[in-house]
Amino acid sequence: MIISALKSNDPKDQRSPIHSDTLSALINTGAEIFFEEGIGDGINTSDNEFKKAGLKAAPRSECISKSDLIITNQALGFEEISLIKSGSSLIGMVNPFSNQELINTCAEKNINLISMEFIPRITRAQKMDVLSSQANLAGYAAVIESAKHLSTALPMMMTAAGTLKPARVFVIGVGVAGLQAIATAKRLGARVDAFDTRDVVEEQVNSLGAKFVKIDLGETGQTDQGYAKELTPEQVQKQKDLQSDVCARSDIVITTAQLFGRPAPQLIDSNTIEKMKPGSVIFDMAVESGGNVEGSVADEVIINNGVKIIGISNLASSVSNHASLALSNNYNHWITDFYNKEENNINFDFEDEIIKSSVLVFNGKIVNERFK
Ligand code: NAD
């Protein structure tokens, strides 16, 4: 079997799907491994380092056309899909919700498509969960980026020149990213409040030393996969009204609220922004999926009423080396768990929950109900 790893085709994404610290898992499959020239540019790893480990460099088109399994951090366009051999497999983060065309093309061209966004949320699959591995690092990066834009320090400092009060950070949405944002802000000495519609996270917030803001929105809850259920418009309005006082006293507000497969809810509007202190920062982690904050724009700092509204695309890529290490481990676990050494191919066993959930196209057919 020939495996190839592709460089990201998005200049904002510096991550690599392979990492020198995690290569042994792939090498041990016995597969022949190619990588796109320059794949490690964004993580300070030269082609030579990968070559020393036994991998072979090739131009992108060659990687795509000769492989049985292609690993990618980004979806491929129609032209590139057309270069893939019939019967080969494409694995990676392929953004399926906004990419029906890719799914249809893979079915037409008989390319098996594995979407790592669809790794099920079961214990056995945690090691393959790209959304969590990247959200964790993004949560960290959101605090670091926000702190850079603040004109105060985060920790309390009692100095001869006066006492400096700790910054107040409010985290809205306490999933994987939110928990890491809380932990990072706490480590930097900030006072942290947090809110989520899933009240099961209250204990986790408290255990990190932060304070859970109680807002009664009536019936909320989560799906069997642990994702939040969508609120009614009345509930969203109530949430906006009740959390605006917490925003007003915060120096940094980090929003992470997402709804799987749907646009993110808008949770901060200009009424709240007007109440906030000039110089404070709102970091919208959902900027790429519709945005939690009115007026946020990806990769721009918008100033509204003196408040800086920040959104950064591919946020995990700002810690590209660790993001690549985690991602490559996620991919390697999927590949090695389903690689059949005797037959030298991938065992697409649809009795397996992970295969059933993550494989969107198999043998020329769309097999995931959601995309049929
Ligand atoms: P996510 O990225 O879909 O959403 C981020 C957070 O926003 C969630 O906590 C969600 O409840 C919250 N949110 C949605 N609407 C909101 C609103 N109006 N106001 C405030 N918050 C709102 O979620 P995620 O980070 O991917 O994870 C969600 C849960 O799943 C977490 O508890 C996580 O620990 C769990 N999880 C389990 C597994 C597993 O079992 N394998 C893997 C990953 C995550």
Image (cartoon, rainbow, N blue to C red):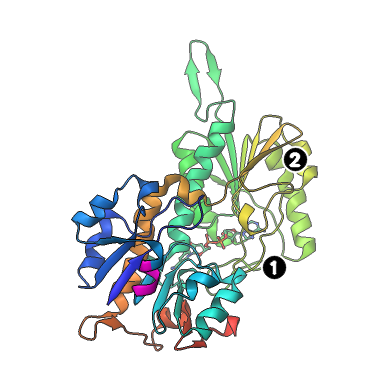
Magenta-drawn stretch, dominant element (helix, strand or loop): helix
Residue at 42 percent of width and 71 percent of height? 91
Q: CA distance from mark 2 to mark 1?
A: 27 Å
Tell me the quarter of the picture where residue 150 sits. Answer: top right
Name the element at disc 2: helix
337 lies left or right of 238:
left
Q: Quadrant of the C terminus?
A: bottom right
Q: Which residues are magenta?
A: 62-66
- Amino acid type shown at disc 1: Glu
Along the line of sight, the residue nearer the viewer: 205 or 233: 233
Instruction: Give the vertical position of 104 relative to 156 (above or below).
Output: below
Could one spot residue 206 in this view of the protein? no
| Residue carrying label 1 | 219
Name the element at disc 1: loop
Could one spot residue 264 in this view of the protein? yes
Which numbered tag is attached to residue 338? none
| Residue carrying label 2 | 273
Q: How many marks?
A: 2
**Label 2–label 1 contact, CB within 8 A:** no
Magenta span has 327? Answer: no
Query: In which of the image's four quarters is ligand 1 placed?
Result: bottom right
Residue 102 position within the rendered picture, expressed as x and y whole percent measured from the top left? 55, 74
- Residue neighbourhood size for the residue with mark 2, other residues' Cα within 10 Å, grouped as few (<14), some (14–19), many (≥20): many
Which of label 2 and label 1 is nearer to you?
2
